[in-house]
């Protein structure tokens, strides 16, 4: 039975690549989606390449990117996710218990795409986050609190933990400072300088946001959705072209051995 989902909300429809936060620490600074990706999506949308040949179907993992959120307890991970997914901010502190992930639906270049946003269930308090939480992530968000220097200091350790179960070549990294509304301008400038330096070193994209005011939260997640989408389409296209060239190689080999057999039997 086909389950019909409600249409994607208007503010989750992405037609242009959203801009990075700062040019100094961006995953890439191109001002548009990759041309190959754009063409592939256009072909897909106009029905020139049918869904199967592109690998897109509701069950296909290409439609969903797993995004994990890590960082010290209390830095604002849950508030950040709630601000984006539910557009709420709850001042009363509640440790996250038993939550696994929120699904957020988008449409990127006309193609349905979802982010599976994984929030820790309070395990970060004991630094015993399970490897099932980390495994198979397309993006890692390392969160620190812009008003708390120690939390930035711990960011590198969180990243190391998260990378242990992931392939560095296929994961996009984001370093995000939260509680921008709380941070004193002097401390903010100092923390940002340090965070940009760390982002360059670990090849992460840096963002500063506030879940309380909502500043930059939406742009941040739209950017994650766009970049993970772009990366999944590119890797799928690469996989398909590798498959196609393998088929050509196999058929060439078959031709060669056929020719050899023919020539040896005729002479
Ligand atoms: P988590 O343990 O990392 O999930 O942290 P929470 O999201 O539960 O937030 C911890 C505390 O920080 C809560 O008391 C929130 O109200 C507060 N908080 C989170 N984000 C912000 C923010 O952007 N601004 C301010 N002022 N407080 C925040
Ligand atoms: Mg939490």
Image: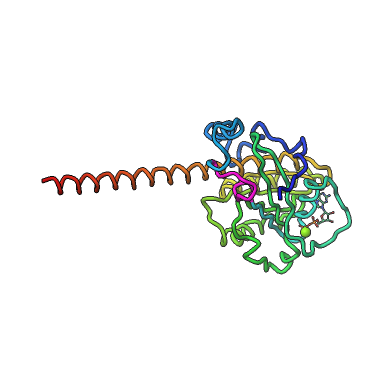
The answer to whether residue 144 shows anywhere in this view is yes
Q: Which residues are magenta?
A: 54-65
Q: Report whether 151 appears left or right of 44.
A: right
In the figure, is residue 168 to the left or right of 89?
Answer: left
- In depth, the one of 174 and 255 nearer the eye is 255
Q: Nearer the viewer, residue 262 or 27?
A: 262
Extreme residue toward the right, this view: 92
In the depicted structure, whether residue 211 falls above or below residue 38: below
Residue in view at x 38 percent, y 45 percent? 247
Q: Is residue 198 visible?
A: no
Q: Residue furthest left?
A: 267
Instruction: Decide: is 112 above or below 175.
Output: above
Instruction: Out of 254 and 179, give the one closest to the viewer.
Output: 254
Q: Is residue 256 magenta?
A: no
- Residue 118 location, x and y as percent? 70, 56
**What residue lies at 67% left-to-right and 55% top-to-bottom?**
68
Residue 121: percent from the left, percent from the top? 75, 63
The spot of residue 235 in percent (x, y) is 52, 45
The residue positioned 68% from the left and 57% from the top of the image is 70
Q: Residue 178: x percent and y percent?
A: 75, 49
161 on left or right of 208: left
């Amino acid at each position: 039975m086909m389950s019909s989902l409600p249409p994607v909300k208007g503010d989750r429809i992405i037609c242009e690549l959203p801009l990075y936060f700062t040019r100094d620490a961006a995953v890439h600074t191109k001002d548009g989606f990759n041309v190959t990706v754009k063409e592939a999506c256009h072909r897909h949308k106009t029905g020139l390449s049918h869904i199967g040949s592109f690998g897109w179907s509701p069950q296909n993992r290409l439609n969903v990117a797993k995004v994990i959120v890590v960082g010290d307890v209390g830095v604002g991970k849950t508030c950040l996710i709630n601000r984006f997914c539910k557009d709420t901010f709850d001042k009363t502190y509640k440790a996250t218990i038993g939550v696994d992930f929120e699904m957020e639906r988008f449409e990127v270049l006309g193609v349905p795409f979802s982010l599976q946003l994984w929030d820790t269930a309070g395990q970060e308090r004991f630094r015993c986050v399970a490897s099932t939480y980390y495994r198979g992530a397309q993006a890692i968000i390392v969160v620190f609190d812009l008003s708390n220097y120690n939390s930035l200091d711990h960011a590198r350790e969180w990243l190391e933990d998260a990378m242990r179960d992931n392939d560095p070549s296929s994961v996009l990294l984001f370093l995000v400072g939260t509680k921008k509304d709380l941070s004193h301008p002097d401390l903010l400038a100092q923390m940002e300088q340090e965070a940009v330096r760390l982002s360059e070193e670990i090849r992460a994209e840096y963002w500063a946001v506030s879940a309380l005011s909502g500043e930059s939260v939406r742009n941040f997640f739209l950017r994650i959705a766009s970049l993970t989408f772009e990366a999944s389409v590119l890797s799928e296209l690469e996989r398909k072209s590798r498959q196609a060239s393998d088929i050509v190689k196999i058929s060439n080999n078959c031709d060669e051995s056929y020719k050899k057999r023919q020539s040896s039997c005729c002479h």
